Image (tube, rainbow, N blue to C red):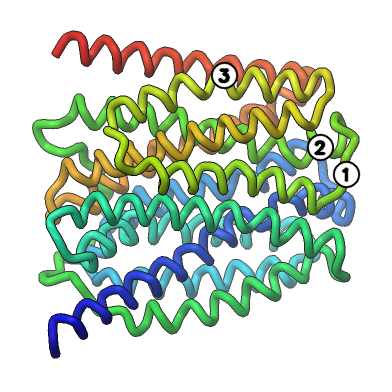
Amino acid sequence: MSVTSVSAVQTGSVRGVQAAVAVLALGGTLPAPLYLLWQKQIQFSEIVLTLIFGVYFVAAVVALIFFGRLSDQIGRRPVMLLGIVIGIASTLCLIFAHGLAMLFIGRFLSGFSVGLVLSAFTTFLSELIPGEDSQSRAADLSTITELLGLGAGPIVAGIMAQYLGLPTLACFYALLALLLLALLPAYFAPETLAQRKPLSLQPQLAMPEGKEAVFFSLAAAGFCMFAMIGLFTSLVPSVLAERLHNPNHAIAGAVAFELFLVAAISAAALRHVASGPAILTSLILIPLGLILLLLGINRPSIWLFVAGTAVEGLAIGLGFANTLRAVNQQVGSEERARVLSLYFVVTYTAAMLPVIGMGLITQFANPIAADFTFACIIGLLAITAAIARVSGSAAR
């Protein structure tokens, strides 16, 4: 096979694997505009709504802890296929959900499927992409793929729920078809793992040896980015419907899509900016965007809310892309899956905390207090992380 043919095969494999993971990520956020509809149909409390929302992140973290190294043991391609099959099972559960049990199982399986493939995906891309800068390019493509997939979910579901029949089912029929199609590129992708390790479910998350302080700084910044994602995705449906007086599901999906679209565009357009300044800028932008979001909620003004969403999207795109790229560059192929798994455990835990925390606070205080509390916490964390990065740079 000629060099050109090999390159074409590798490019096709990269695009196919990207498409498969984008569909899995889409399935993770697809229910975002539908939770309030499910709540009315099945009649469950706010705390149950919070738990259904949060179980996705719990499942992703569980998968990362116990199965984050699975691609080192059975191969990259089998893990991708397994993730898609579990995603199909999740979708079937949500299609046939007529009560809480199936909703919980469906959302757990969805989170588990995404957690299973997260570190394998970036590792797979690092091995499929040729060249000395494969780690950087793999991290960039991984970031953009995940952000676009996460962003597509709410707008697809919102439009279908608002304008098509079967508001809580149509989008899952579409997702099921996409997941079945995603099996093809994952199946035909070449296996890149040269030597398999013994199968073990014992957690072996690790920081890169000798670079623990660098990893901690990057993970702390990533924590802030994903905490913001968790806060935002838990806010949008209820804020638009109840406090901005706009119950249109398509608009709720569009606002959520704005966050991830701006994040993906900024990650792609600003990929040549040095990681240090980019991460610092992203941390500074988080509290600024939060101020606009809170002003939009309390005035109320949807345009301020949209402006705050754009600022947070820019922050997340810069922060997520550059922290993931820097982490990927710190490690060799032998430890990449373990280190990336730890990074994603930190970030997905961060996304989970505002979702569960705000649900609990609203049991004892009004929603405005919950919004303000977590906005302040995340803003202070971002400021602290920014100060720590500046101090660390000055110390060096």
Quadrant of the image occupied by residue 75: bottom left
Give x and y (percent) for residue 197: 14, 65
Q: For the residue labelled by badge 1, is the local secondary structure a helix, a strand or a loop? A: loop
Using the numbered discs, state the Cα–Cα distance from disc 1 to disc 3 in whole angstroms.
27 Å
Q: For the residue labelled by badge 3, is the local secondary structure a helix, a strand or a loop? A: helix
Q: How many marks?
A: 3
Say which residue label 1 marks: 247
The amino acid type of the residue labelled 2 equals Leu
Q: Residue at x 47, y 54 (%)?
A: 146
The amino acid type of the residue labelled 1 equals Pro
Residue 288 vertical placement versus 216 (above, below):
above
**First along the sequence among labels 2 and 3:** 2
Give x and y (percent) for residue 198: 16, 65
Whether residues under marks 2 and 1 lie with C-beta atoms below 8 angstroms apart, the answer is yes
For the residue carrying disc 2, how many other residues have a C-alpha within 10 Å: few (<14), some (14-19), or many (20+)? Answer: many
Residue 77 vertical placement versus 243 (above, below):
below
Using the numbered discs, state the Cα–Cα distance from disc 2 to disc 3 in whole angstroms.
20 Å
Please give left or right for residue 85 compared with residue 252 in the image: left
Q: Residue at x 64, y 16 (%)?
A: 373
Q: Nearer the viewer, residue 195 or 396?
A: 396
Please give left or right for residue 122 compared with residue 211 in the image: right
The amino acid type of the residue labelled 3 equals Leu
Q: Nearer the viewer, residue 323 or 175?
A: 323
Say which residue label 2 marks: 240
Give x and y (percent) for residue 102: 69, 63
Please give left or right for residue 100 compared with residue 132 in the image: right
In the drawing, what numbered circle is on residue 288?
Answer: 3
In the image, farthest residue toward the bottom: 1
Image depth: mark 1 or mark 3 in front: 3
Residue 239 vertical placement versus 117 (above, below):
above
Q: Residue at x 41, y 13 (%)?
A: 384
